[in-house]
Image (cartoon, rainbow, N blue to C red):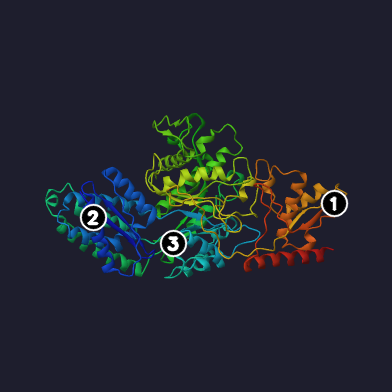
Amino acid sequence: MLLFFFVLKYSLDFCVFLCFSPINHELQIVALKSLFFRCFSVYPSVKTVAFPLFLTKKRKETEFLVTTINKTLRLYCVVLSCLPFSLKLFSSKPELKMGTCWFLRLVLVLGLLGSCVHGLGVNWGTMAIRKLSPETVVQMLKDNGILKVKLFDADQTTMTALAGSGIEVMVAIPNDQLAVMGDYNRAKDWVKRNVTRYNFNGGITIKCNNFRYFITFAIQIQLLLSPSNVVLRNIEASTCCTSLRELVYTEKEKWNANLATPKVNWYVAVGNEPFLTSYNGSFLNTTFPALRNIQNALNDAGVGDSIKATVPLNADVYGSPDDQAYPSSGRFRSDINDIMTQIVQFLSQNGAPFTVNIYPFLSLYGNDDFPFDYAFFDGAPQPVVDKGTGIQYTNVFDANFDTLVSALKAAGHGDMPIVVGEVGWPTDGDKNANIGYAIRFYNGLIPRLVGNRGTPLRPGYIEVYLFGLLDEDAKSIAPGNFERHWGIFRYDGQPKFPIDLSGQNQNKFLAGARNVQYLPAKWCMFNPNAKDLSKLAENIDYACSRSDCTALGYGSSCNSLDSNGNASYAFNMYYQVQNQDEFACNFEGLATITNQNISQGNCNFIIQIVASSSSSLTLSLMAFVTVLLTFLFL
């Protein structure tokens, strides 16, 4: 049996040729030449790179083909652009009978369903002392094929930069605005200013609604080429592929018509983890009214069918009782059970998902008794057995997710869609927060997501947003020093470590932010000639209170510095924040400026970036307010 399946993505100007034949090597060569002749005769301008791959076993063929398709191309381009070439080839080979078409059916269906994954999203936080321009970040997202982003506000400059980019967006209402959204008129105004104004062709794109076309197409191909059909078994490949060709072009016309006027689905995140126990109930009475008003405002604006309001919640809103500590016993927290039930019912009524933030890292943080390997995905030595179901759990992510599934089931909505709004691993600020563990975590997580493995109680696709995109050196460190180090990119938009977002574990450094401008190559360091060291500790505290010294903490990247090194690190961080002002590197004679990089080992003494216009304006306003208050109170 010989199968030729040509894959072309014209936007990338290359193709992959997959050739399977256990019969005759010469026949492979002849068919290969024939295929390329056909390709160039139809698309002579295409620059083609071919990779002939010869396999002999169907199982290997299937696994390899699905892996290759998922890794190299978006399959909708494959089907719509390249299938005609394959069909031409099939129709010209009368020896290709139903067995080959059956294999094509398997490949198409598996590939279609696999590539219908909308892709990973990322959280784009902006709590940084110096921010990259939104345009720079959007370009960085596009350069890395990241087409989904979750925000924590509705900043106009960010939204404007995203408009027309094709990147799907989850826009957000901060917790401090929830009370205001209790007024329906204010909620309507917010929707008008931050949602509907961008809801046009070329505006903000969120979740183009083409998934049903993939599924319909796959099902039709299955029905057309099913080997269980006795009649179709006797149809020669040419007849089979002629019918399939007609189906392709019919579906292509439907698809293009739909794309001409795309429906865009938004998520509006109402608050962010408003029911955290550490908030002491501050947002218990304002979250659900805000959710209800925002969704109703979306409905009244005529966009409620495609734009859904949801509430990103921390995993602490549910759990299992101490005497039944396994996922199948999951229930919502007793003190918020009533409000959670109301929220879940409202989400269900409006077709909105439940959004949860899951952090395996936090299971380790501050808990030395937690089984370390259970936080990752490469196999815990002693799986946790759910006594209610008998399921063995080898990682805390699956167990946590399934606890939520059980809680939703207990609330009467066990089939509610779940979005993981945040999941990730920090790279500094704690003994367990480092690049090595981050790589291990993502190497386990991403292939599972891309492969649509799901969890034991909810197998299949899970929509996930990684946390986060960039380090944020102005975030609160109340939860821990690691809070400023969640990014897969550094503060300057440069990648921290190799990672493969396609899930194939072929790690490489992502594309960094372009054209980033840095301050001059100057650092502030401890003055070795300083005589009076009595105020050294006081000056270090001053510098760290106005900059980010979290890397100096226990187990962090700069924890091994000596006392002079600690002082240099603190002084330099403050100096960079102050735009390398000469007077910001004095500290009562304890510091001096140097042109030599004083980084040590894994401890990086940064040079700050030149602030974007929005950051400059913010810093200018802060400076003006500081001067004004000083003048008033002197």
Residue 625 visible to the viewer: yes
Mark with earlier residue (2, 1): 2
Residue 184 visible to the viewer: no
Residue visible at 77% across and 52% down in the picture: 542
**Residue receiving disc 2:** 221
Give how far across and how far down residue 88 sits, in percent.
21, 62
- Which secondary structure lies at badge 3? loop
**Residue receiving disc 1:** 529
Mark with earlier residue (3, 2): 3
Q: Is residue 262 left or right of residue 515?
A: left
Name the residue type under label 1.
Answer: Asn
Q: Is residue 516 left or right of residue 23?
A: right
The label number, if any, that marks residue 322 in the structure image: none
Name the residue type under label 2.
Answer: Ile
Residue visible at 44% across and 61% down in the picture: 206
- Graded by Cα atoms within 10 Å as few (under 14), some (14 to 19) or many (20 or more), the crowding at tag 1 reads few
Give how far across and how far down residue 26 sits, in percent.
22, 52
Give how far across and how far down residue 223 sits, in percent.
20, 53
Q: Nearer the viewer, mark 2 or mark 1?
A: 1
- Graded by Cα atoms within 10 Å as few (under 14), some (14 to 19) or many (20 or more), the crowding at tag 2 reads many
Give me the C-alpha separation between circle 3 and circle 2. Answer: 28 Å
